[in-house]
Image (tube, rainbow, N blue to C red):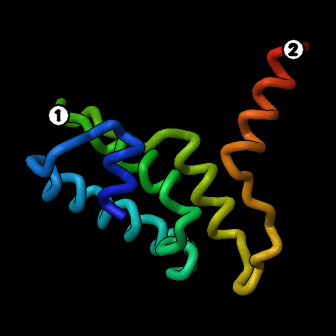
């Protein structure tokens, strides 16, 4: 998962891997404690929310770190998912691009 989070954040190299992995572990534990099922936390579809959480925690200032409203909202959505609820549609990047293009024509 670290490689996908780093790609999403535009981070290359391995210098910060230990710090990033620590943030990934912290975010995943937060999600588990919030009631998100382990299978959902570990799923490919959770990389985005985990990346958001890592980005929120990635702050070198003292005491200024906080999780974003989007992160909280997404964790609540995922925690509300019932076991075996795999029928929720997942957009692929082509569908998102088409939606953006359609919206920009309005």
Residue 36 lies in quadrant = bottom right
Residue at the bottom extreme, as displayed: 84
The residue indicated by pointer 1 is 60
From this view, report whether residue 42 is shown above or below residue 104: below
In the rendered view, does 84 fall on the left or right side of 32? right
Q: Which of the image's four quarters has the N terminus?
A: bottom left
In the rendered view, does 1 fall on the left or right side of 47? left
Residue 17 screen position, x and y as percent: 16, 55
Residue 30 lies in quadrant = bottom left
Mark 2 vs 1, N-terminal side: 1
Q: CA distance from mark 2 to mark 1?
A: 40 Å
Residue 47 screen position, x and y as percent: 48, 58
From this view, report whether residue 59 is shown above or below residue 95: above
Q: Residue at x 74, y 52 (%)?
A: 91
Q: Residue at x 27, y 56 (%)?
A: 23
Residue 42 screen position, x and y as percent: 47, 74
In the rendered view, does 27 fall on the left or right side of 17? right
From this view, report whether residue 53 is shown above or below residue 98: below
Q: Residue at x 79, y 24 (%)?
A: 101
Q: Nearer the viewer, residue 3 or 83?
A: 3
Nearer the camera: disc 2 or disc 1:
2
Q: Which of the image's four quarters has the C terminus?
A: top right
The residue indicated by pointer 2 is 105
Q: Residue at x 68, y 60 (%)?
A: 77
């Amino acid at each position: 998962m670290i490689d996908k989070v780093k790609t999403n954040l535009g981070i290359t190299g391995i210098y910060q891997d230990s710090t990033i992995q620590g943030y990934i572990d912290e975010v995943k534990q937060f999600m588990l404690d919030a009631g998100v099922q382990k299978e959902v936390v570990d799923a490919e579809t959770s990389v985005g929310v985990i990346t958001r959480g890592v980005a929120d925690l990635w702050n070198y200032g003292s005491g200024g770190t906080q999780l974003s409203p989007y992160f909280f909202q997404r964790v609540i959505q995922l925690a509300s998912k019932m076991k075996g609820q795999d029928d929720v549609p997942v957009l692929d990047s082509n569908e998102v691009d088409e939606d953006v293009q359609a919206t920009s024509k309005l």
